[in-house]
Image (cartoon, rainbow, N blue to C red):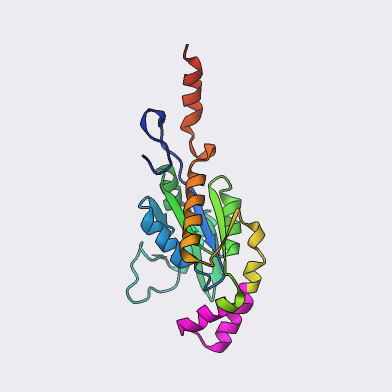
């Protein structure tokens, strides 16, 4: 059976891929969920962003980021080659269109780990391809505890992250689906169900129109 639930003589063509956009406050689990979902679905790929910041130790071109000079990035902005982009702390970040379009045309699904602003931009640029999922923490107190247990940030930074979390959660109702991450296995199961259902949508199977036309010609 194929990954989109169609097999045997019924399957007549390639399914168009989709853009699965995951957003959440920092610490709510979207990165861990996205990595686990990809590990369970070999035909899923993670979107790779472009950036003008310098590579960090161990980062690989085309695997972690597409590294560009500011001039190269700005030329691509002018040419409309990004689905979305932003400037953060003097560095550009963006989602190149070309590799995403190639994956979608080949029937591969692309996962995005981005904030609500990026999700909004993607939905505007590719409304038929984007599926947005917001990951909610079970409580802000638990979210704060998760951030503290990381032992990566000072109390001031954690406070700033919590304020930002509230600001991000305000946009939950812009999403197609909302998953409460109160239990990792259950949240992962819900994400898998969303992915499977979206893969079955009629609009992702352009071959169906021709198939039905031929079907109706049969005596």
Q: Is residue 72 visible?
A: no
Figure check: 84 above or below 92: above
The percent coordinates of residue 80 (x first, y second) are 53, 53
Where are the magenta residues, as a range? 143-165
Q: Which image quadrant: the N terminus?
A: top left
| Residue closest to the far bottom | 155
Dividing the picture into quadrants, the one containing residue 132 is: bottom right
Q: Main secondary structure of the magenta part?
A: helix
Judge from the rendering whether residue 206 lies leftward or rightward of residue 67; answer left or right.
right
User: Is residue 163 part of the magenta span, yes or no?
Assistant: yes
The percent coordinates of residue 169 (x first, y second) are 63, 68
Figure check: 70 above or below 3: below
Q: Which residue does the image show at 48% across and 30% down from the upper left?
A: 208
The percent coordinates of residue 217 (x first, y second) are 49, 15
User: Is residue 182 part of the magenta span, yes or no?
Assistant: no
The percent coordinates of residue 27 (x first, y second) are 52, 73
Dividing the picture into quadrants, the one containing residue 55 is: bottom left
Figure check: 15 above or below 113: above
Figure check: 188 above or below 165: above
Which one is nearer the viewer's eye here, 21 or 51? 21
Q: Is residue 105 visible?
A: yes
Q: Which residue does the image show at 57% across and 51% down from the upper left?
A: 125
């Amino acid at each position: 059976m194929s990954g989109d639930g169609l097999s045997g003589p019924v399957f007549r063509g390639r399914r168009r891929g989709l853009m699965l956009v995951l957003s959440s406050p920092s610490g709510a689990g979207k990165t861990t969920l996205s990595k686990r979902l990809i590990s369970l679905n070999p035909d899923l790929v993670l979107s790779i962003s472009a950036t003008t910041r310098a590579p960090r130790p161990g980062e690989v071109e085309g695997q972690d980021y597409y590294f560009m000079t500011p001039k190269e990035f700005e030329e691509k902005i002018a040419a409309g080659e990004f689905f979305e982009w932003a400037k953060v702390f003097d560095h550009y970040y963006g989602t190149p269109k070309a590799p995403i379009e190639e994956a979608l045309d080949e029937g591969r699904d692309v996962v995005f780990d981005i904030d609500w602003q990026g999700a909004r931009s993607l939905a505007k640029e590719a409304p038929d391809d984007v599926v947005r999922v917001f990951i909610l923490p079970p409580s802000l107190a638990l979210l704060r505890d998760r951030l503290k247990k990381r032992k990566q940030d000072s109390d001031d930074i954690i406070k700033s992250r919590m304020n930002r979390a509230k600001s991000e959660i305000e946009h939950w109702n812009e999403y197609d689906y909302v998953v409460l991450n109160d239990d990792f296995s259950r949240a992962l199961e819900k994400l898998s169900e969303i992915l499977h259902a979206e893969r079955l949508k009629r609009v992702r199977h352009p071959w169906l129109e021709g198939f039905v036309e031929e079907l109706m010609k049969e005596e």
